[in-house]
Structures are given as C-alpha cells and as structure tokens.
Image: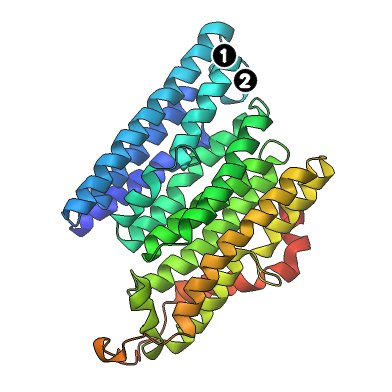
Amino acid sequence: MNPQAKLIFALSLTLGTTLTISSNHWIMAWTGLEINTLAILPLISKSHHPRAIEAATKYFLVQAAASALVLFSSMTNAWHTGQWDITQLSHPTSCLILTVALAMKLGLVPFHFWFPEVLQGSSLIVGLLLSTLMKFPPITLLYLTSPSLKPSILMTMAILSAALGGWMGLNQTQTRKILAFSSISHLGWMAIIIAYSPKLALLNFYLYTLMTAAVFLSLNSIKALKLSTLMTTWTKTPSLNAILLLTLLSLAGLPPLTGFLPKWLIIQELTKQEVALAATIIALLSLLGLFFYLRLAYCATITLPPHTTNHMKQWYNTKPTNTMVAVLTTMSLMLLPISPIILAVV
C-alpha cells in the first residue's frame, strides 16, 4: 500500500473518531462511525490473503448491522420524543436497541463472535487499531447515553464477557486471538461500571489502551504471531522480553503495576453501590485471564522450546528498541503510585 493511501486512511480514521466523540446529534455520530468502518476495511484486507479478505468481510457485515441499529434506535427515539440529542435518549425500546448496537460495535458477549476472527486475519498494527482506536467512538456513545441504559442488561453482558473472554483465551496458541479475548474480558470490566461511574469506565479504557498498545507494539517488534515463535525470541531481544513479561502482568491486573488501578477502583465503586456480589464474581473471573497472561509471560521469558533441533535460535538484535514501546511499557508499569494525581485529573 502506497504512503498516500495510508495517509488518506489514517486521516479518515482520525476524522471519523473526532466526528463521533465531539457530536451531539445522532446523525453526525452515525456518520463518524461509518467513516471509521470504511477507512479501516482497506487496512484489514491490504495483505490480499484469503484470511484477511474474510476478516474484512466479517468486519464490514457486523459493523454495518450495528450502524443500522444505531440509526434505527435514534430514529425511534426522535419519532417518540422529537429529540435528536445523544444525551436525551429516553424511549425504552431505543435504549434496548442502542445497547445491542454498541455491544456489537465493541464485541461484548453475546455479540463477540466476529472480533477474534477479524483480529486473527489482520496484522498486529491493524489489530492494535481494532482493539483501541476503533473502540473509542462506541465507548464514548456508551458514556454519553449511560444514564438511560439499563444497568441490569449491562451487568449481565459484562459478567458474561469477563467469563467468556477468560475461558476462551485459555486454549489459544495465536497471540492475536489471545489479545482479542483479553479485549473482550476488559470490555466486561468497562461495561459493568459504566452505569454507576462513567468516568471510571473511561479511565479503565484509557489504561487498557495504554497497556494493549505496549503489548501489540512489543509483539510487532519481535514479529511474534504464535506462542511457538514467542518461545525463541529471548535470544533476539532479552530486555524487551523481560519488559513484555511485566506488561502482560500489568494487563492481568496484578499489583503494584498500572493494570491493578482500574480493577481496584471498579471493585471499590461496585461495593459502594451495593452490588458486591457482581464485584466478587467479576474479580474471580479475572483469574481466568490471569492464567493466560501468565502463560504468555512464561512462553516469552522462561520456557525453552521442547524440540530445540527444530527451532533456529534468532540472532541477537542490536538495533535500539522503538521509543514509543519504551514510553508505553514504562507507563504500563509505573502509574499506580501516582494514582491520586490521575484521579484528580479525571
């Protein structure tokens, strides 16, 4: 793909995201979502591999259906109330349809089936965009409409997402699929709290984006698409592998790393809202995620491949690590001590 085309698609993604997150009118928000979808499709299918074409087709069909539901929801609300303002969503049917539409956009259970397959058919950089930037406009719409949505439906989807994201990630050998199920699990944490504390859900999304970007860029720099490849990269970039171990543990939510902060605050807020049972269930379900993060970390740093004769050791990489990876991994590990400042800003 030539640089001019890449520039156009990057600008379109920026335009679509900005349009959705800054609009008050449903039609403008819907337009932004459509621009985003059309801009990411060529990036998914640029390798011309059958799996990439399949991923782009699946992504287009799901996102088109979800966009149609967003439009239908807003039109139903406008028909009954005369309001096109995003924050004035009050009709019960519109709220239900919008919850389904945004769950499809984000990949929440039970509308998650497309996400691991699309991520597996994309490159690591496009997978990073799908896991972070493409989730930002739907999360923003969820944030703006959260007072109108039913907490019981969101909580059910959140607990199912945390359970299924953890459970399905256990048996995977492809790093992109593992990160896809990790994303579904993290979205469960965001969905469970958004009805009670929308700002906390956004903070969780920002920190998740930070840690996921660090993991994706680290995996991209060592070209690790499978666990078997990850096992042999310790000879190539030992320092990056050691940092990747800690970043994965941060993504799992272990103290004293950054990933512990959102989980701690969400459990605290749920307990204050007298839904301690839901807090207990989702905290226990995060142990499933911890298992496959530990498995990734174990493969990255500790394990030798079982058949050393079949695996060529890679040459030690003398090139310096990307500055972006260094900054993101540092932030993924070090933000917990300054959490009072973060909470004051948010």
| Mark 2 crowd level (few <14, some 14–19, many ≥20, 10 Å Cα) | some
User: What residue lies at 72% left-to-right and 41% top-to-bottom?
Assistant: 197
Split into 4 quadrants, where in the image is the N terminus?
bottom left
- Percent from the top left, x then y, of residue 302? 49, 85
- Which residue is denoted by mark 2 in the rendering? 88
Residue 154, picture quadrant: top right
Residue 129 image offset from top left, x and y in percent: 40, 54
Residue 331 seen from this side:
no
Amino acid marked by disc 2? Gln
Q: Position of residue 333 (x, y in %)?
A: 62, 73
Q: Could you say which disc has been placed on residue 83 in the image?
A: 1
Answer whether labels 2 and 1 touch (C-beta < 8 Å): yes
Return the disc, 2 or 1, that comes first in the chain's sequence.
Answer: 1
> Where 157 sits versus 238, above or below?
above
Q: Position of residue 238 (x, y in %)?
A: 44, 88
Question: Amino acid under label 1?
Answer: Gln
Q: Secondary structure at mark 2?
A: helix
Please state which of residues 326 and 308 is positioned toward the viewer in this rendering. Answer: 308
Residue in the image at 52% along x and 36% along y:
22
Query: Mark 1 falls on what kind of element?
Result: loop
Residue at x-position 46% and y-position 42%: 107
User: In the figure, residue 6 lies in which quadrant?
Assistant: bottom left
* Rendered view: 65 above or below 13: above
Instruction: Tell whether 238 sits left or right of 123.
Output: right
